[in-house]
């Protein structure tokens, strides 16, 4: 019981535990900011997250199966959220695929209006992060991008579109290199959500 990342005594002797406790605090901030926007527009946090995702990602990712993986929730939970969004006329279902049971989702004009009111929910957090120096931000981003990649490799994060797992990425003389862009990547150019991401066949 004593060996817990949430035990202050352990945090004092183990910086990893201290970092995890800090990340939990930040995740709480994220949830609070999202809930505040949700109450304003009469939607649940996951419904807002789905709308924002649809607004900024290509249509082939905007379906029930992928959204379930994206947000680490079940397909029935996504379907329930989509049902509400459809009832409120915030989305449009496109059944034009070969499988008549599946559909992709796009925003209606009303849905686009809701996104314009909610997509900036994380700005208070961004404002604080913007206050760090460029070198501090580079170091923090480098650590976060590697952590996200490792969590995905270990099956904890089901979806990520970071350079490290992409078929176009390689190490070139110990530097990060993108074969699609045909250029070396600076640490701040590593992407966490790349539109051109294609997963490596060998994982």
Image (cartoon, grey):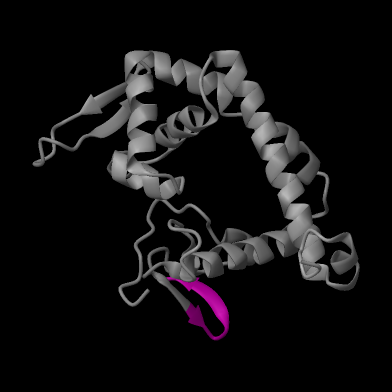
The reply to whether residue 130 is visible in this rendering is: no
Q: Foreground: 7 or 179?
A: 7
Residue 33 screen position, x and y as percent: 68, 30
Please tell me which residue is depicted at 32% across the width and 28% down the height of the picture: 106
Which quadrant holds the N terminus? Answer: bottom right
Q: Quadrant of residue 143?
A: bottom right
Query: In the picture shown, does residue 171 fall above or below 194?
Result: below
Please tell me which residue is depicted at 53% across the width and 56% down the height of the picture: 192
Residue 116 counted in the magenta span: no
Residue 75 screen position, x and y as percent: 33, 42
Residue 141 screen position, x and y as percent: 67, 59
Classified by dominant secondary structure, the portion drawn in magenta counts as strand
Query: In the picture shown, does residue 71 fall above or below 200?
Result: above
Please tell me which residue is depicted at 83% across the width and 72% down the height of the picture: 14
Q: Foreground: 20 or 60?
A: 20
Residue 172 counted in the magenta span: yes
Query: In the picture shown, does residue 110 fall above or below 127?
Result: above
């Amino acid at each position: 019981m004593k060996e817990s990342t949430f035990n202050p005594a352990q945090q004092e002797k183990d910086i990893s535990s201290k970092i995890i406790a800090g990340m939990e605090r930040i995740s709480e901030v994220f949830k609070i900011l999202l809930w505040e926007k949700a109450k304003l527009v009469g939607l649940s946090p996951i419904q807002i997250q789905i709308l924002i995702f649809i607004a900024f990602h290509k249509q082939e990712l905007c379906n029930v199966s992928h959204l379930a993986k994206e947000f680490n929730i079940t397909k029935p939970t996504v379907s329930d959220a989509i049902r509400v969004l459809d009832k409120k006329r915030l989305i449009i279902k496109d059944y034009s695929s070969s499988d008549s049971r599946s559909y992709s989702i796009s925003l209606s004009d009303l849905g686009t209006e809701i996104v314009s009111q909610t997509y900036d929910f994380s700005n208070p957090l961004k404002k604080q992060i913007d206050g760090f120096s460029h070198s501090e931000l580079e170091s923090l981003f480098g650590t976060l991008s590697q952590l996200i990649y490792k969590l995905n490799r270990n099956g904890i994060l089901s979806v990520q579109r970071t350079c490290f797992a992409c078929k176009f990425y390689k190490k070139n003389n110990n530097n990060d290199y993108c074969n699609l862009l045909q250029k070396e990547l600076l640490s701040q150019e590593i992407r966490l959500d790349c539109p051109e991401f294609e997963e490596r066949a060998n994982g």
